[in-house]
Amino acid sequence: MERIYPPRDLPVKVLVSDHARERARERFPGYKTARIVDEVRLAIREGRLAATKPGDCKPDNPRSLYAWTPDQVRVFVLRPTVFGLVVTTVYRRGLAA
């Protein structure tokens, strides 16, 4: 079967809420929030997407998905919608969302 999208792209949109941008700036000083979409797309491509929070994080939200950076420092909380995946917040691993 032939792919209908370029191999580097995902067949889903990744959108970022204002709240997620604010939390990323607050929790990761100097972090460029424009990188959120790139980091989430990379996490999905590399299989770092789950319905449960990674490791030592607080209880899961049944309506959310979770993606994380390769170093497992940033965790992205994603909400599936008809428009794509919306990043609702960003937090440090081990801290509550």
Image (cartoon, rainbow, N blue to C red):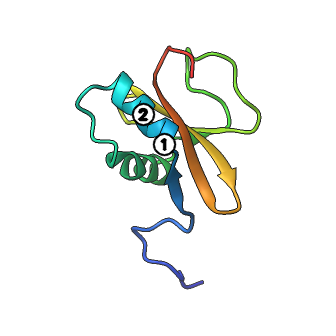
Where residue 96 sits in the image (x, y, percent)?
56, 16
User: Which residue is under mark 2?
Assistant: 22
Instruction: Give 13 or 6, whichever is nearer the viewer.
Output: 13
- Quadrant location of the N terminus in the rendered image: bottom right
Q: Is residue 9 above or below residue 62?
A: below
Where residue 65 sits in the image (x, y, percent)?
64, 40
Q: Is residue 19 above or below residue 12?
A: above
Q: Is residue 39 above or below residue 74?
A: below
Checking the image for residue 42, the label placed there is none
Name of the residue lying farthest toward the right:
62
The answer, for residue 92, to whether it is visible in the render is: yes
Q: Residues within 10 Å of mark 1 (few under 14, many from 20)?
A: few
**What residue is drawn where x is 72% and y is 29%?**
61
Q: Are marks 2 and 1 in contact (CB under 8 Å)?
A: yes
User: Which residue is under mark 1?
Assistant: 18
Spatial CA distance of label 2 from label 1 is 6 Å
Q: Amino acid at mark 2?
A: Glu
Q: Is residue 44 left or right of residue 63?
A: left
Q: Is residue 27 left or right of residue 89?
A: left
**What residue is drawn where x is 45% and y is 47%?**
40
**What residue is drawn where x is 44% and y is 53%?**
41
Q: Residues within 10 Å of mark 2 (few under 14, many from 20)?
A: some
Residue 72: quarter of image: top left
Q: Is residue 9 above or below residue 88?
A: below
Q: Amino acid at mark 1?
A: Asp
Residue 36: quarter of image: top left
At mark 2, the secondary structure is: helix
**What residue is drawn where x is 34% and y is 31%?**
25
